[in-house]
Amino acid sequence: MAEVIYMPKLSDTMTEGVVADWNKKVGDEVSEGELLAEIETDKATMEFESFYDGVLLHIGVGKGETAPVNTLLAIIGDKGEDIEKILAEAKNPTKAEVKEENAPEKEEAAPVVKPTAASVPTPVQAAVTESNGRVFASPLARKMASEKGIDLANVNGTGDNGRIVKRDIDHYVPYVPAIGGNKRAHVGVETYTDEPISQMRKVIAKRLSESKFTAPHFYLTIELDMDRAMDIRASLKGHAEVRVSVNDMVIKACALSLREHPAVNSAWLGDVIRRNEHVHIGVAVAVDEGLLVPVVRFADGKGMQEIGAEVRELAAKAKNKKLQPSEWEGNTFTVSNLGMFGIEEFTAIVNPPDSCIMAVGGIRQVPVVKNGEIVPGNVMKVTLSCDHRVVDGVLGASFLNTFKGYMENPATLLL
């Protein structure tokens, strides 16, 4: 009896997935536990193993295609087994629409349109034109080119044998010879590129829109004296085995402050407010397609050096799309630091299910008044974004002042 495999739900926020690669092709034998495919979720590319022994009889979602969770992904059974009835029963209308937009298409040729003086093809682009006066392009690429008014003769094909495919139309930039040379220029030509939205960006947009327009945000900003923190960092630089960054200090100080203000370490769940007794700090990490938030678990019980090593490891995994669900789920509070990019102050959107997120700016050297005298000083601003359904102004201010105490007396973070 053939077994139907559906697009799995590999994370709590996943609604659809992209098949990054198939490790088997139709007709190959498959063993239980053997790697079947690699599936890109909104947060990572994950290996998907087979649950069955048999022969791969059908692939329902091709490499590079997108499909909703629970769409027919593959069928495994006995060699030569009739699967027509299974395919008919498992057919998904949504999947059919996705396939029409993304499936690899049979190679077809489109007639060449003579290039105009304003858009002369480069030598590489012109090479796609066959001597018989035809350009090879997929039907979808031809349709998109027609809608955008793009001359296929001027498009460089990157498909098999120079065939023009969807991505070539998506990334096409008109070529206009510049006066006095053969340089590419945008002279009197309006151009744009429609970039497909990644799974990660779709989920980021959905979750943060829901947060911003559902949770009533308010913001509290406080300035910190960072002189002692800078002194401690300088003193530790002589110890190669000890690496502590300002971000590590911030995470540790947040964790200890949450322990003293457990009401901030909470989540709005609609019918109840969940007061978390554990402290899991989410750390926003920038990747090519947006932001991921790996989680430092039980951060209040870890030293700054341990926190720093863990953050570096998680950040590397995030950038390589190797994070596992256990490494990005369960945050109770989030830190977003843009100080290293020269940002002095900003506000962040609360990261559900947290009730607060801290936005950390950069350290600035400015004149400050100490003991009645103006002296050079290091200051840093942080802004706490709060969900007013859970955290009110006094509670947020109390938390920030506790945090300020730890950051301005960083020796307490070492205890």
Image (cartoon, rainbow, N blue to C red):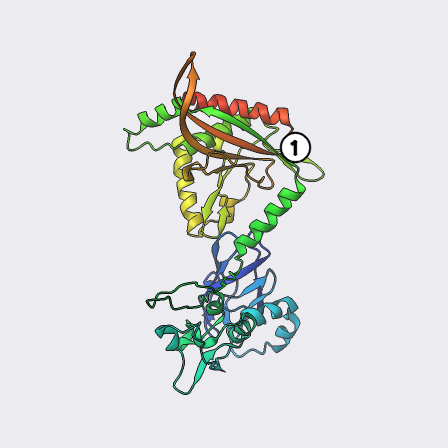
Q: Is residue 352 left or right of residue 311?
A: right
**Which is nearer the eye, 352 or 182?**
182
Using the rendered image of the protein, determine whether residue 12 is visible from the camera's viewpoint: no
| Residue 395 at x, y percent in the picture | 62, 25
Q: Is residue 411 above or below residue 122?
A: above
Return the residue at label 1.
Answer: 390
Where residue 331 sits, quadrant-wise, is top right
Tell me what residue is drawn at x 60 percent, y 64 percent. 71
Residue 304 in sight: yes
Q: Residue at x 27, y 28 (%)?
A: 238
Question: Foreground residue, 296 or 88?
Answer: 296
- CA neighbours of label 1 inside 10 A, class few (<14), some (14 to 19), many (20+): many
Q: Residue furthest right?
A: 271
Residue 156 x/y as whole percent: 41, 72
Badge 1 marks a residue whose secondary structure is: loop
Disc 1 marks a residue whose amino acid type is Val
Q: Looking at the image, is 301 positioned above or below residue 55?
A: above
Q: Residue at x 41, y 80 (%)?
A: 129
Residue 289: x %, y % from top left? 48, 53
User: In the image as oriented, which residue stretches furthest toward the front?
Assistant: 179
Whether 57 is drawn above or below 411: the answer is below
Q: Farthest residue toward the bottom?
A: 132
Across and down, in percent, residue 287 comes to 45, 49
Q: Is residue 155 left or right of residue 351?
A: left
Q: Residue furthest top?
A: 372
Q: If the image is split into quadrants, where does the N terminus sit?
A: bottom right
Numbered-mark total: 1
Q: Nearer the viewer, residue 376 or 392?
A: 376
